[in-house]
Amino acid sequence: MNILGFFQRLGRALQLPIAVLPVAALLLRFGQPDLLNVAFIAQAGGAIFDNLALIFAIGVASSWSKDSAGAAALAGAV
């Protein structure tokens, strides 16, 4: 594998975890007291940000596996 192929694979591995960030930010913002003041929406966004390292580990492990199996994602979570 050449260097370009490596970085393309790395970019694909990071796409899913990075795609989750705007959704988490919107949830966190909509739950703030000056907007909708719904606590469980803010807690959902906060939970995504609190577990961001776990989301990245699962996303990278599942995309680097040969068949994108769930076992690799579970191993990445551990």
Image: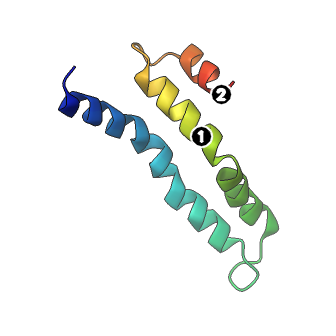
Does residue 41 sit above or below 34 in this rendering? above
Q: Which residue is mark 1?
A: 55
Q: Position of residue 34 (x, y in %)?
A: 72, 86
Quadrant, the N terminus: top left
Indicate left or right for 10 with 77 as reference.
Answer: left
Indicate left or right for 54 with 38 as reference.
Answer: left
Indicate left or right for 75 with 3 as reference.
Answer: right
Q: Quadrant of residue 12?
A: top left
Residue at 57% over, 67% down? 26
Does residue 72 sit above or below 63 in this rendering? above
Does residue 25 sit above or below 64 in this rendering? below
- Disc 2 crowd, CA 10 A, few/some/many (<14, 14-19, 20+): some
Q: Position of residue 43 (x, y in %)?
A: 77, 60
Q: Position of residue 3 (x, y in %)?
A: 21, 30
Q: Quadrant of residue 49?
A: bottom right
- The disc placed on residue 71 is none
Badge 1 marks a residue whose secondary structure is helix
Give the camera-side residue of 41 and 76: 76
Closer to the chain start, of discs 1 and 2, is 1
Q: Which residue is mark 2?
A: 77
Give the camera-side residue of 1 and 66: 1
Residue at 45% over, 41% down? 16
Measure how far apart labels 1 and 2 are at the Cα level. 8 Å
- Disc 1 crowd, CA 10 A, few/some/many (<14, 14-19, 20+): many
User: At label 1, which amino acid type do we have?
Assistant: Ile
User: At label 2, which amino acid type do we have?
Assistant: Ala
Residue at 55% over, 17% down? 72
